[in-house]
Image (tube, rainbow, N blue to C red):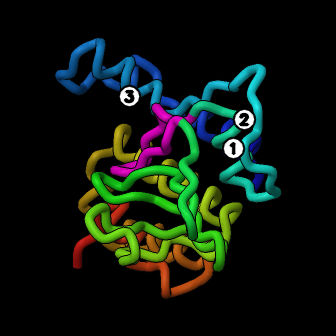
Amino acid sequence: MNAEIFIRRLKELAPSVEDFKNYNVSENYIKDHISRYDCKPRYNTYFNIITSDEILQLLQAYDCSKVGIGNLSFVNEVIEAEDYYQIGNVELDILVLNKITLEIEVRDHDSLDYVIWPCASKSDLFLEALLACAVFLRSLLSNPLLEQDKDYMLDVVNLCSEKVGGEKYLDFYKMLLGYFD
């Protein structure tokens, strides 16, 4: 999946103010939540990293720092290290694109050499799986009972892990979607 398709489809998933009518939340919370589905284009930007990698292109051309998919967020600007690019965070841990394998990984914030979760074999597949996660998480707003449907949740987890390369990535999507068996 390329960056433009990801951005367009994510924006299409954004809830409306009306979707929160059954929830006792503030207008600021609603506005904040809706903004999590929108990447703003960057104008007059200089591309520090010349690449064909979809996530690096996405994060250099768009500000996705407000996007949140579960507990995953993107950085405002890509941070280059010796063997990876930091592209986001999963809670306190860092989401990276490994320069050598081109895999997406979550690394421990205290021990950056330690990979907590491998996430995807390639960036474009990761964007596709993230979109599937966003669809699932968005559906919980309309139907909170889906969170209790462990079979449905496991189907989404399996779908995501298959999209990105197989069973090796399963635990990341279980964590991201809150599937605990």
Q: Which numbered circle lies on residue 10?
A: none
Q: Is residue 89 magenta?
A: no
What is the spatial separation of the Cα atoms under label 1 and label 2, in whole angstroms? 5 Å
Identify which residue is drawn at 54% across, 60% down: 81
Horizontal side, residue 157 vs residue 63: left or right = left
| Image coords of residue 11 (percent x, y) | 60, 32
| Image coords of residue 40 (percent x, y) | 63, 25
Question: What segment is highlighted magenta in the picture?
Answer: 64-76
**Residue 41 visible in the picture:** yes
Q: Which numbered circle lies on residue 61?
A: 2
**Residue 163 visible in the picture:** no
Give the answer, above or below, for where 33 lies relative to 165.
above
| Image coords of residue 122 (percent x, y) | 67, 70
Residue type of the residue flagged with mark 1: Leu
Residue type of the residue flagged with mark 2: Ala
What is the spatial separation of the Cα atoms under label 1 and label 3, in whole angstroms? 21 Å
Residue receiving disc 1: 58
Mark 1 lies on a secondary structure that is helix
